[in-house]
Image: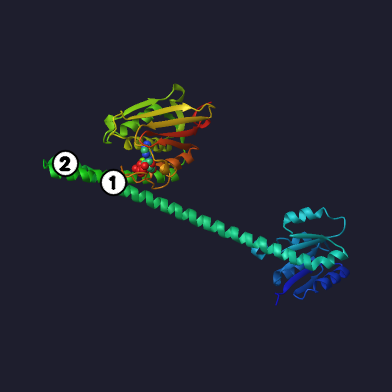
Amino acid sequence: MQETVNILLVEDEEAHAELIKRFLERSENFNVLTVTDLKSAINQINNNSLDLIITDYLLPDGEGIELIRLKGNFENDLPVILMTSQGDEHIAVEAIKKGAIDYVVKSESVFQELPRIVNRTLREWNLVKAKKEADKLLTKQYHELQKTNQELDRFVYSASHDLSAPLKSLLGLINVAKLDTKDNQMIQYLQLMEKSVHKLDEFIVEIINFSRNTRQEIEYEKINLDNLVNSIIDNQSFNNNFDKIEFQVSIPDELKIINCDQLRLKIILNNLISNAIKFHAYHRSDIPYIKIDIYKSADQEKVIIEIEDNGTGIEKGHLDKIFDMFYRGSDINNGSGLGLYIVKEALIKIHGNISVTSRSNRGTTFFVELPADELLDK
Ligand SMILES: Nc1ncnc2c1ncn2[C@@H]1O[C@H](COP(=O)(O)OP(=O)(O)OP(=O)(O)O)[C@@H](O)[C@H]1O
Ligand SMILES: [Mg+2]
């Protein structure tokens, strides 16, 4: 059996009201309650459970439009079909804007059509309602997700910080122990321990960087690129084989001072330069080099940072995956595969891009593109 639809009809012209009621109640499940003015309509809305309102526009004590969104809160709202006389069509726009869901011009043929119009209006109303509810749920879930994300981020950040301090003291103790012993076997063990602690420390730094990149506001400031690149290279000097590498840095005068976010730029350069050092082919006879070239694109729109090495190269099959989280293309190093993922994320923050070309056993070149209008004063 179909559910009863309770309709409130607000119409002061008796003949019209009678006719409409008769047509509507041809549908077995329509139950029509008729009132003749606004005041009684409001009374009915507040005290009865209704499904829909059909109202005349002009009523003895006001306009039918006033019944739209009466309760101000969508769950309790009712769909309203507004009726006007011929010639009052201009009211339609106002009515629809206010939230009337349908609009009809009174005539006998329209009255006959009303059962169909009511059914259509109810269908539309249910769709609108379902969409509103889905939107509400989505907004709620979005806020919950955002909160969980922030909590997770805070947790990762503080856990990484707390792990970092004891590691630093462990490194210090290992160094003291190395000085205290002449036992070669013991020194070898200590060196292995040191290497492991370094690895763990690097991993923690990467996680802290990732977390910083997500949470820290972007802050553009003047940066001396020459100094930045050189200090990043110097910081890598603990790497084995560092001394064997020939660094060639070339930055034209106009690009020596740029505006950029220091944190992100450092993360990007650090990772790319440390990769270029790590993945060198030291067994080959050619001199290992790392070229860092900074220049403007031909159309002057981009500043390009090119980092080229003649190291191990990357096999074709790996090339499109190296920017994925935790992806490592080879076992020759003991990294965690986070570096390039963080580079990509940091570049999103400063509106940049990265691409790569590589030949196995020949070398690799990374191209970082940054928007020139943001980096350079006009
Ligand atoms: N300059 C390069 N030469 C050769 N291979 C590279 C180079 N840079 C990246 N790769 C390849 O891309 C992979 C992903 O690089 P990524 O920096 O993300 O991770 P990782 O260096 O292995 O570890 P992490 O950076 O976390 O210490 C590397 O494992 C390596 O296989
Ligand atoms: Mg790396």
Q: Which mark is residue 165?
A: 1
Q: Is residue 179 above or below residue 22?
A: above
Q: How far across and down, in percent of the image, does residue 268 sit?
A: 41, 37
Crowdedness near tag 2: few (<14), some (14–19) or many (≥20) residues, C-alpha within 10 Å? some
Q: Colour scheme used in the picture?
A: rainbow
Mark yes or no: residue 11 visible: no
Q: In this view, does 239 lie to the left or right of 8?
A: left
Q: In this view, does 65 lie to the left or right of 160?
A: right
Q: How far across and down, in percent of the image, does residue 78 sit?
A: 70, 65
Front disc: 1 or 2: 2
Q: Which residue is drawn at 79% across and 61% down?
A: 82
- Residue nearest the observer in this picture, 157 or 269: 269
Quarter holding residue 255: top left
What secondary structure is found at the residue carrying circle 1? helix
Quarter holding residue 91: bottom right
Give the amino acid at mark 2. Lys
What secondary structure is found at the residue carrying circle 2? helix
